[in-house]
Amino acid sequence: MKLAAVDVRQAASAADIVYDALRKAIIEGDLAEGQNLRQDQIAQMFNTSRIPVREALSRLEQHGLITTERYKGAVVAGLSIEEIDEIFEFRAFVEAEVMRLAVPNLDQDALAAARKYCEEFGLETEPARWGEINRSFHYSLYAASGRPYYLQIVRTSLDRIDRYLRAQLTLTNGVMRADREHKAILEACLNGDAGLASRLTRDHVLDAGRSLVAFLKDQRA
Amino acid sequence: MKLAAVDVRQAASAADIVYDALRKAIIEGDLAEGQNLRQDQIAQMFNTSRIPVREALSRLEQHGLITTERYKGAVVAGLSIEEIDEIFEFRAFVEAEVMRLAVPNLDQDALAAARKYCEEFGLETEPARWGEINRSFHYSLYAASGRPYYLQIVRTSLDRIDRYLRAQLTLTNGVMRADREHKAILEACLNGDAGLASRLTRDHVLDAGRSLVAFLKDQRA
DNA sequence: ATATTGTATATTGGATCCAATTTTTCTAAC
DNA sequence: GTTAGAAAAATTGGATCCAATATACAATAT
């Protein structure tokens, strides 16, 4: 008897599912800063008990996405202007380095994927999709760096500020500038110019940070 | 498994206490790579139930210090040579930048503290204390950078590889070299030479990484 | 003796219950 | 009507119990 091998990958645990869903909701700004997260309420949403919810919240707290206080519960973490500023500075620093390391290893597939995301970003009219396409574009290039640890750090850093970025892209016309900068980065990659791609990446992140901080200062004043 | 039992009736939650204790034990190498961590066993050590233990394990997993598998439990995560190499490269990159940012802000208190730790490191004969003094020395300088987010990243990066570093310092005479390099870094800081302090910091971390990787390759072969 | 099958044990993830404390609501006095 | 205090509700952290599954081991067949 011959049977096709079946992949019996474990279904994700309830805690994993809740964690992923909440992380996504926070990153995308669906859960506003300061929003209260009741364990009971979330448990009911996912049809589970509070145990996996608590585990998910604990993980989110480790990543700085929420804060918790005993008897009071969890709230979506807000960032001060200074914190946002620092994270952008850090991202610019690290992502420029990742880009520099990636360029020599970029193959045709990676470049084709990046080009696809780059075009997609420029054409997309639905603001809710900009954030994801933006990530896909950058990661498709960064992956060639062969630095999984760096990429993990980049991911968690981006997680912290992504919702602000998305809000700003939606409310201003920062997309056009981002689109221009993406095209320039892609061009440098196609030419194999690691130094230029790196500098453009740094400036791209710093630009976004500056407009966002200006936007938030205005908004919060 | 060597692990100090702690009384749970304190301000922090049981989960916090278990997390801190396990983190410390892993970082300091008291829990060996590959060591099985049974929820029941840990719960008994801390006189609690498995619930806070599970929360602690979940957090440790988020930081890459353990891996868990359903029905099998948690094991202390081991790192491949490549992963260790990458983390050292990353640390050198980030810590050099932090040092560069810190130097202009160093005041007399910070320099005095750094000098104290530097001397302490050179005089300490108990290998178990090298790791902690080493951290204190570097952090006393890094703190002046005014970059809490960078420092958090540095901390988690160091957490991942600290136990290997400590083992190597204990088994080789890497301390003497580290001590020399610390003195050179301190000197550059005293002279206010940010560029030099930054380069020396980068080389200091890279040196440690190279000796460690050489040591591990030999040991694992 | 070896391979295979069935069973007992160990271990984790989740549900439910309990204790501690905060927040809210209601009542009573002014 | 307002305010102080007490009772009720809400909410979290932890303990205990249950379900699912992996592992170890004994029993059996070849």
Image: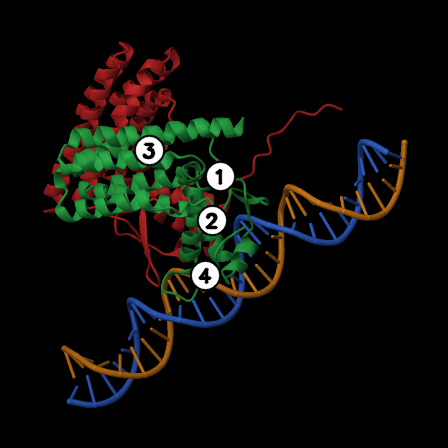
Chain colours: A red, B green, C blue, D orange
Between residue A202 and residue B221, name the one nearer to us: B221
Q: Are marks 3 and 1 on the same chain?
A: yes
Quadrant position of residue A127: top left
Q: Nearer the viewer, mark 2 or mark 3?
A: 3
Q: Nearer the viewer, mark 3 or mark 4?
A: 3
Q: Are marks 3 and 4 on the same chain?
A: yes
Residue A21 relative to residue B38: left or right: left
Residue A173 visible (yes or no): no
- Give the spatial CA distance, label 1 vs label 4: 24 Å
Labelled disc at residue B57: 2
Q: Earlier in the sequence, mark 2 or mark 4?
A: 4
- Give the spatial CA distance, label 3 vs label 4: 37 Å
Label 4 is found on which chain of the structure?
A: B
Q: Earlier in the sequence, mark 3 or mark 1?
A: 1
Q: Dot 3 corresponds to which residue?
A: B177
Between residue A174 and residue D23, name the one nearer to us: D23
Between residue A145 and residue A19, name the one nearer to us: A145
